[in-house]
Image (cartoon, grey):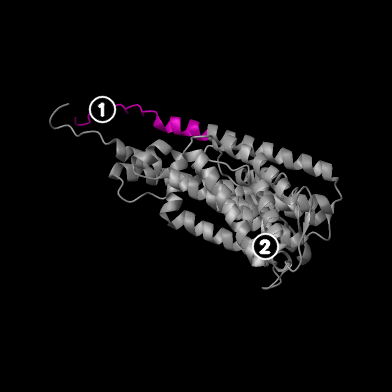
Amino acid sequence: MPDNAAPPHPPASAAGAAVGNGPPLAGAAPEGAASAAQATAARRGRSLPEQAGLLVVLVALIVFFWAKSPYFATEGNIINVLTAIAVTGIIAVPGTMLVIAGQVDLSVGSGAALCGVVMASVAQSQPIWVGVVAALAVGILFGLFNGIVVTVFGVGALIATLGMLSVLRGITQIVANGGTITLVNFSALGTGRPFLNIPVPVLLLIGVIVIAILVMRYTVFGRSVYATGSNPVAARLVGIRGNRAIVTGFVASGLACALSGLVLDSQLSAASPQAATGLELTVVTAIVLGGASLAGGRGTIQGTLVGLLIIGVLNDGLTLLNVNSFYQEVASGALLIAAVAFDQLRLRLAGRAIRRQARPRAASPARPGAQP
């Protein structure tokens, strides 16, 4: 290498790659920051049409069911839709963070059931607040366990959480002894309406969404999540602790499962070991439908909210139209397949666009008479 040649700077390039899907990190080299800014601008340019398309689908569903059923647009039915998506939404918010980080948690349904059963079991002999604390502790513990298995032992999140799905469901059956545990004096969390006639689960969902948006947009943790999902190797080169962000995401997911399990207990005044069965599929559908990529590095909490509303409106509208529940299951499964297929199509189109932009442009011929 000639003496006057500048040495290469892999970390700077890595900085640009690592933060390409999130706000640029401080301390990145100028060229890394420039590429990060271009990538961020491109992401914003893509997210607007995607979210606009989702909103068009949501509005179209609302208009269709409104025209088909006179009960759809009533205040009571709107509250029912929001309440129905609250349990799923509370779990889908940290689930979105995990998907952005390139991970996935399939144990959320079993985790919610376990936390609910633990709370009800403890509340049989202890004050209710002790059962609530026990449920929250159990959620944090199995979320931490998932994070350690994925980051320390290197087990893929899909396999680790799929195994935990069965483990937690089995533990739930053992704790409940295969039966339903009844609860008394615990209905306020699930059915109370303390503010503007809005149910507590909806208020909890709104609070979780607002906190998550602020965290993902304005904190180092949020930028680390995007960086880890975009390019974990590059993120590690610039000093981002991706494993810490992943473990934190799993702990948040476990805590959300506990909160959802408590809401289910309160709504049903009982805890069942069969509760929340299949909830993980609805969560993944909402996240992917909202624009998050299963490959990581891409997605927003706002998009997941729109995906939740689409699922809630679709299920509610089909119920009002007296569509058989079996066909509703078919519609839910088809929606999941369509969301994942659309995600893969977006990845292919994005890859082609990047390769097209990366091609060197042919030098334009010199004009006659131009000065050298």
Tell me how many marks there are: 2
Residue that badge 2 annotates: 201
Left or right of 319, for residue 86 = left
Lower sequence index among marks 2 and 1? 2
Q: Is residue 192 something that shows in the picture?
A: yes
**Which mark, by number, is residue 313?**
none
At x 14%, y 27%, the residue is 2
Q: Amino acid at mark 1?
A: Pro
Q: What residue is rendered at 78% in x and 42% in y?
A: 329
Which segment did they paint magenta? 349-372
The residue under the point 46% across, 46% down is: 226
Residue 155 is situated, as x and y percent measured from the top left of the image, at 52, 34
Q: Quadrant of the N terminus?
A: top left
Is any atom of residue 299 visible in this view? no
Of the two numbered discs 2 and 1 in the rendering, the one whose residue sits closer to the viewer: 2
Under mark 2, the amino acid is: Pro
Contact between marks 2 and 1 (CB within 8 A): the answer is: no
Whether residue 362 is in magenta: the answer is: yes
Q: Looking at the rendering, in which quadrant would you find the C terminus?
A: top left
- Which residue is nearer to you in this view: 367 or 311? 311
Q: Which residue is mark 1?
A: 368
Q: Label 1 crowding class (10 Å Cα cut-off): few <14, some 14-19, many 20+?
A: few
Residue drawn where x is 54% and y is 45% of the image: 145
Q: Does 242 sit left or right of 312 as displayed?
A: left
